[in-house]
Amino acid sequence: MADQSPAAVEFADFSLWYGTFQAIYGVDLAVKEGKITSMIGPSGCGKSTLLRSVNRINERLGYVRTEGHVRVLGHDVYAAENSLVQVRKQVGMVFQRPNVLPLSIRDNILFGHRLHDGGKDAEDALLESALRQVLLWDDVKDRLNRRAQGLSLEQQQKLCIARLLPVKPRILLMDEPCSALDPKGTEAVEELIWELRGAYTILLVTHNMAQARRASEECVFMLMGKLIEHTATDQMFVSPRCPETADYIEGRYG
Amino acid sequence: MTDRKADPAVDRRDVAWWSDKAVSVLVFLGGISAILFIIGIFVFITREGFGFGEHFKAGEIFGSTRWAPTSDSNPTYGILALVAGTASVTGLAMLIAVPFSLGAAIYIAEFAKGRTREVLKVLVEMLAAIPSVVWGFIGLTIMNPLIIQTFDVPIGLCVLNSGLILGLMAAPIMTTIAEDALKAVPDSYREAAEALGATRWQVTRRVVLPAARQGLLAAVLLGVGRGFGETMAVLMASGHSINLPTSPFDSVRALTATIAAELGETAVGSPHYQALFMLGILLFAVTFLINLAADLIVRGIRKG
């Protein structure tokens, strides 16, 4: 299956160390634009680390060292001349636990917009369209000034996705976005992610192989900090190329 | 089915069981004794101070600046100047301490990394441990000539001097409490804001400071309480003369310093003695209210 769509995120011989511990070993990966790419693998295989390298959010820890390149829309995010703030504008991120800010629903949605000096006039329209895109508008339109922490976890996670949209990112990083949700919430958020494909390039880390199968078009399998296999999701789960992938998918380890 | 006899092995009172009981009784006594002591102190101060009732003229006490309890002909007990002294010194101290301690707390909690942060934290805590008489000494021997020289005033023991000293004294404890308040803000908020492209200062200003608002207010209030109750440093650096201050270079006398300086020289049970205890009640009430307010605010954080 030849695919012409260009890479939205590209890792080139990328390695990463936490202190002296090497978490990522020379990963080469091209994430196709407009697709949902899921990343699977056992705990500690580096999938979250790889995801967090795209917007360099893992450097908050302060003892991270990298080699190689990560290019987002053609820009090397580790090159000194590229501004991290601009990169993060293009790359939205959703975390494991919904981390709404202790502000009103409105202020949460418009937080990024205001950070980047968006105009005041556009706010109402942005607010509505963001909430509509995540199917939350009807639930919250009457309480936009209430604290976002009063929402259910599912609604909070949707809000966390909606909050990214006014900044108009091209890429969404999702780090196990459903792990704190019940099956109903998981289903709703998965559906939402599926709706967003095409408009955004989505990188989805998941612990749940069934989720990767349901909710992604491309699939990446990682093991011990190395990228083992990257194919279309259908193919990965039906006829994996590498024996490690097959063993993992069949549940022999991990 | 017959009733099963209780297995004695399950109900064994061994050393661990008894020591647990003993410790819980001891801890209970320790906890309750603190409360008893406070009530005892309160009762004692109140009893000594309430004897002042017969000389109590509210208009004179709160309306007059003349504090002359030892006058033979006309003893007056106006505390207005003393209140003004305490208020001016505390107020100036807070003007100095609040920006410095909040700045230090923000730097330590949000900007400093690794070693720098650890070293700074230890240093701030060491500053908090300097005895107040040492601060008073600094006020007397270093600040005093410095103020006289710099501002060309006849005396350097004044509101400015004691306010500065008190501000420096209150800053470390306020820094520590404010830093705790900032640390209590969940890291997930910072991560969320940073991922949206916020700079470190934007994260601090738009997310961390609003979230820590109550804790920071509590830190300031505790600083005010500290300033209000501080005695020795103020006694040494304020000039200790009864005055309604009109400029930072006026000498003043604080409530606490008055008690400390005069109580030893009064006859037990005399009106002067009782008047000093009345000042004590006033201080007690004000610091109690401030601490209570701070405590309620901190509780609010945990709930909110």
Image: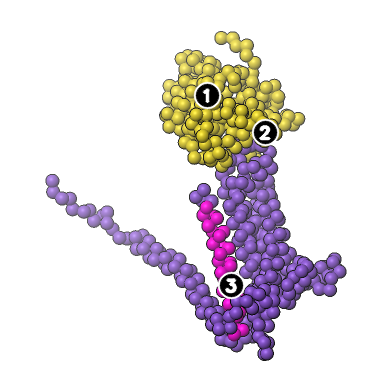
Chain colours: A yellow, B purple
Label ID, residue A193: 1
Q: Nearer the viewer, mark 3 or mark 2?
A: 2
User: Mark 2 falls within which chain?
Assistant: A
In-front residue for pair B261/A61: B261
Q: Foreground residue, A162 or B203? A: A162
Residue B144: image location, x then y, percent: 79, 71
- Mark 3 crowd level (few <14, some 14–19, many ≥20, 10 Å Cα): some
Segment tinted magenta in the rendering: B271-300
- What chain does badge 3 belong to? B
Cα separation, mark 3 vs mark 2, equals 51 Å
Can you give x and y, in whole percent of width and height, for residue A76 in the image?
70, 26
Alpha carbon distance from label 1 to label 2: 29 Å
Tell me the crowding category of disc 1: few under 14, some 14 to 19, or many 20 or more residues within 10 angstroms, Cα based: many
Of the two numbered discs 1 and 2 in the rendering, the one whose residue sits closer to the viewer: 2
Q: What label does residue B282 carry, if any?
A: 3
SS assignment at label 2: loop
Q: Quadrant of residue B240?
A: bottom right
Tell me the number on the disc at residue B197: none
Q: Which circle's residue, 1 or 2, is located before the other in the chain?
A: 2
Examine the residues drawn in magenta and state their main secondary structure. helix
Amino acid type shown at disc 2:
Lys
Residue A222 sits above or below residue B205 on the image: above
Residue type, label 3:
Leu
Which amino acid is tagged 1? Ile
The residue closer to the viewer here, A217 or A226, is: A217
Return the mark for residue A120: 2
